[in-house]
Image (tube, grey):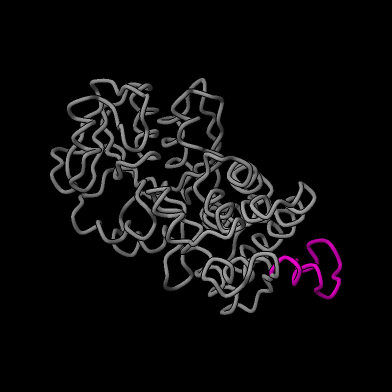
Amino acid sequence: MRAQVVGAGSWGTALALVLARNGWDVVISGRASDSLEQIATRRENLRYLPGFVLPKSVTACEIGAEEGEFDLQVHALPSSAVLSVLDELKPGRRIVLASKGLIPTGDGILCDAVAEVWPDAAISVISGPNLAVELAKGIPTAAVVASKDDEVAERVRDAFMCRTYRVYVSNDVRGVELAGALKNVLAIGAGVSDGLGFGDNTKAAVLARGLNEMARLGHVLGASLATFMGVAGVGDLMATANSTLSRNYRVGFGLGQGRSLTEILEEIGQVAEGVPTADQAVRLARKYEVPMPIFQVLHGIIIGDYDPRDAVQALMERTPKREGFDWL
């Protein structure tokens, strides 16, 4: 079985490693970079995922230079780049979207946008509490594969499932995608809270109420509430919002300390999906008239409209509300 992983960052490399360990021949495709050269010559992605030797069944090439057919094609690029490479690629038999972000137009769902370009493709999405380094180490990890077609989801599950990677299946494509993208914004919020020196009470409140906002938007967009309460929702949120391995948490921590967004992103050296997703989430909230005050405040902190400490105080002074999913 042959798989193509589009994206030579830490996430794409970790997924390629899982597939290779499961017996797949894997081609990692990316833009011309030192990472591709390192994978080809040194069997290691020294820039994005150092310390993991890739087996000989993993090769690398530039996007568009692939040869032959692929049984599986995994997209692990930053969400903003996924659509831009489709014209250069030939779709595999099954498409797996592993990117965790929204698009700046329409309802912002990558799966729908890819389906418009490749209407005959068997598309699924994979998401969950999957920090790349931990997945590569073989630390017990879980994820969800969602597809409108049960057989497609089950085939993709079987490709990734192993002793250390437990994969569930779902039909809620929209919910799994939205949960994987929106939690990145809340991870920035968790980092802001810690960067300001607040305690666990503050962070827990931000995450709990933020999860309510995530589910509220998802409900309006046709997602299932159960998805936000599961591995792809609260599970991914817990991992991303509490780990220094999370790029989004590190962005928030830096903002809470008063550093500039530009400086933080330059230091991280990779895309933090929560930054563009905050803008897209606020746009969708306005479009569908969904109250999302925490997301709005976090967006303001990210773009520099709010001082982080003043923003937290503004949230604390809002008119009291009834707790629960009263919007159902």
**Quadrant in which residue 188 is drawn:** bottom right
The quadrant the C terminus occupies is bottom right
Instruction: State which region is magenta.
Output: 311-328
Residue 149 on image: x %, y %:
46, 47
The quadrant the N terminus occupies is top left
Is residue 324 a member of the stretch shown in magenta? yes
Residue 97 on image: x %, y %:
40, 49
Q: Which residue is more in the foreground, 119 or 280?
A: 280
Residue 88 on image: x %, y %:
18, 55
Q: Is residue 203 above or below residue 293?
A: above
> What residue is at 84 percent from the left and 70 percent from the top?
321
Is residue 173 a member of the stretch shown in magenta? no
> What residue is at 17 percent from the left and 27 percent from the top?
41
Q: Is residue 284 above or below residue 150?
A: below
> What residue is at 56 percent from the left and 79 percent from the top?
287
Q: Report whether 227 appears left or right of 326.
A: left
Q: Report whether 159 appears left or right of 224.
A: left
